[in-house]
Image (spheres, rainbow, N blue to C red):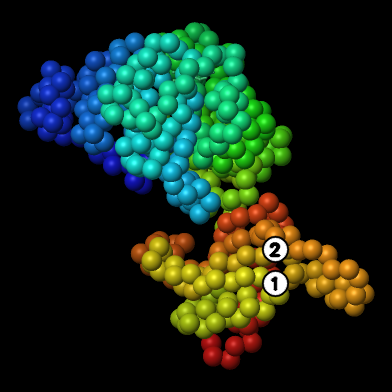
Amino acid sequence: MHPRNSYRVPPDFRELAKTYPPLKPCLIFQGDSVSIDFKNEVSQRRLTEALLYRDFGIALEIPLNRLLRNILDRLNYVLWIQDIIQATQFLERSPIRGMDIGTGSSAIYPLLSCKLDPHWSFIATDVDAFSLQSARSNVEKNGLLERIQVFATSPDAPIFAPLHADPKTSIAFTMCNPPFYSSREDVAASAEAKEFEPSAVCTGADVEMITPGGESVFVRRMVDESLQIGTRCWWYTSMLGKMASLTEVISSLQGHAINNYGVTEFVQGTTRRWAVVWSFGDVRLPDSIARTTAPQLQSLMPPRNTLRQPFHALSQNPSRLAELLAAALAAVEGVRVVPLDMHMHTPNAGAAFTVSAVKNTWSRGARRRHKHAAESKGPAVPEPAAPGLVCRMQWILPDVSHGQEGSGTFLECQWVLGKDRQLFEGFASHISRKVSEGVSADPSD
Ligand SMILES: C[S@@+](CC[C@H](N)C(=O)[O-])C[C@H]1O[C@@H](n2cnc3c(N)ncnc32)[C@H](O)[C@@H]1O
């Protein structure tokens, strides 16, 4: 579960019903304990409505013939999108506009997101007339008509129809909980497999749950379409309910040479869901957002954007480490180095710098080419204006409260911006080597 998801423990149903009286008839009293019947569709909906009302001030009516099983996984997904935007907001300043593909009758993602962040707005699409009407009414009931635009589309139209309709529109992200199954038989087979799960109520309409080829085909259509939309959307994302679909979507991204992507896993009880993110921009996500530690997913993970080199010597002398790092950075020609106050964000962070480089000036080959150009006195080649690499270099100092990983001293290089992985890895290894040389030459340890 996402660390900011507050639903780690079951609610006090009695108290909840006091705040939201329509839940009262659903309460089941057994001695001192109070619960509800999770297999009862009405009870489930009242519980979801009650939590949304109490915790987010959202007034919602969930029709009995449409899906909204629980909000825990919906909240997990919204919080992960928040993480992505917050980590990369140096480019996408507020206001932030997102698009929810297949918003459903509740418009749950736009409502939750807009209640959590007053700077966010949404385009919310769907193909189902009933859901569109119900979504509009829920948006209106919550006074969010100015921030959530409900957009009717059709199954044959492009999935990102609103971006096609207006080529000037650009957005920060897309999100989607796609129809999951490929057919009624697929729904039945899945229900059978879940026979013994305690809360296996699934009462969606066919249009919500079924799409030709299932979720994998739907999301791979998104990948194909995103090639045309490109950087008019910074972060394309989708939820996935089957591990096999995740494998197929990642393989589609790799097939299109989309290397700026990430995967996360949402675990809730025995249920696992995944979400995938990709981008054509050059902003790189921290590994904490784009990679999971789940062993069975490692083969699907993108390469690391954070490289760590252990340093045991001088671990008791953070100010000397800071000097060595500053000196190694200062010795690289043509890079801009800005010191950062990382202590505000990471308690065990030592000295930290943001480094921007227009091009490779540090490798032996680059230095040789530079010397040759200077000697030949030919016409000056204009420098590119934008940096080809931005990264954050910092010391991570021992911190016993952070378990094993926090118990050593590391030089960390986090890729923040750029298209060229070799440039990033080459720079990280150059600085690491220079700092190592400085540490070895230092008589004080
Ligand atoms: C699994 S439901 C998700 C509903 C809601 N987002 C939620 O999480 O509760 C999938 C939704 O996608 C809609 N849908 C199906 N095909 C679509 C398409 N091509 N474009 C937009 N929405 C579509 C369905 O009508 C349905 O509302």
Q: Position of residue 325 (x, y in %)?
A: 58, 77
Q: Determine the secondary structure under disc 2.
A: loop
Disc assigned to residue 334: 1
Residue drawn where x is 51% and y is 48% of the image: 92
Residue drawn where x is 53% and y is 75% of the image: 312
Up-down relation of residue 159 to residue 319 (above or below)? above
* Circle 1 crowding by C-alpha within 10 Å: few under 14, some 14–19, many from 20: some
Residue drawn where x is 38% and y is 43% of the image: 119
Disc assigned to residue 358: 2
Compare residues 288 and 123 and report the one nearer the observer. Answer: 123
Q: Amino acid at mark 1?
A: Gly
The answer to which quarter of the image holds residue 7 is top left
Left or right of 383 in this view: 380: right
Q: Position of residue 319 (x, y in %)?
A: 48, 82
Q: Position of residue 376 (x, y in %)?
A: 92, 74
Q: Amino acid at mark 2?
A: Val
Up-down relation of residue 213 to residue 306 (above or below)? above
Q: Earlier in the sequence, mark 1 or mark 2?
A: 1
Up-down relation of residue 317 to residue 334 (above or below)? below
Mark 1 CB within 8 Å of ligand 1? no
The N terminus - image quarter? top left
Mark 1 and mark 2 residues within 8 Å of each other at the beta carbon: yes
* Cα–Cα gap, marks 1 and 2: 8 Å
Disc assigned to residue 403: none
Q: Position of residue 267 (x, y in %)?
A: 41, 36
